[in-house]
Image: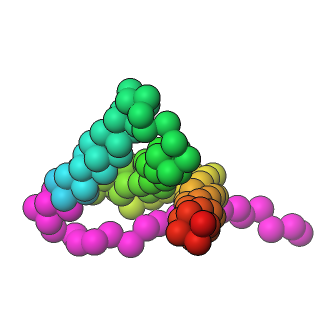
Amino acid sequence: MSNGSSITQFLLLAFTDMRQLQLLHFCLFLGIYLAALLGNGLIITAIVCDHHLHSPMYFFLLNLSLLDLGSISTTLPKAMANSLWDTRAISYSGCAAQVFLLVFFMSAELYLLTVMSYDRYIAICK
């Protein structure tokens, strides 16, 4: 007889069981998310629109802003939705996608910061 059970979803640990605090968490997460979107959006817009900012350092900053947008957009919307709708479940594929994307964006951000620091080291030495 084979085992017929499979994992279809995970249950997340909630911050609190009180509805008022869940709404407070949603508002805080929304503020953080909007601040990150606004800040990174302004950086991207400034670099793209101004032709004087098309140097390698600003190219790195543009990519760093894009990676930051990707990493914060991976997990925060699901956390906000869980706080707003009082749910705790995430599908197995959704969890795998979040983990994969978060690891991808964070490792790409670390590699980019390494390249940026090496670029500044070369600029200072020469």
Q: Position of residue 115 (x, y in %)?
A: 62, 63
Give left or right: position of 65 versus 80: right
Q: Nearer the viewer, residue 115 or 69?
A: 115
Q: Position of residue 48 (x, y in %)?
A: 43, 31
The chosen color scheme is rainbow
Task: Looking at this view, name the residue that lies furthest to the left.
Answer: 20
> Residue drawn at (60%, 66%), measured in percent from left and top?
126
> Residue drawn at (28%, 72%), measured in percent from left and top?
15
The residues colored magenta run 1-26
> Residue drawn at (29%, 47%), measured in percent from left and top?
39
Q: Position of residue 33 (x, y in %)?
A: 29, 50
Q: Position of residue 58 (x, y in %)?
A: 47, 46
Asked whether residue 49 is in view, the answer is yes
Task: Looking at this view, name the residue that lies furthest to the right.
Answer: 1
> Residue drawn at (31%, 50%), measured in percent from left and top?
36
Q: Nearer the viewer, residue 116 or 123?
A: 123
Picture quadrant of residue 6:
bottom right
In which quadrant will I find the N terminus?
Answer: bottom right
Q: Nearer the viewer, residue 88 or 117?
A: 117
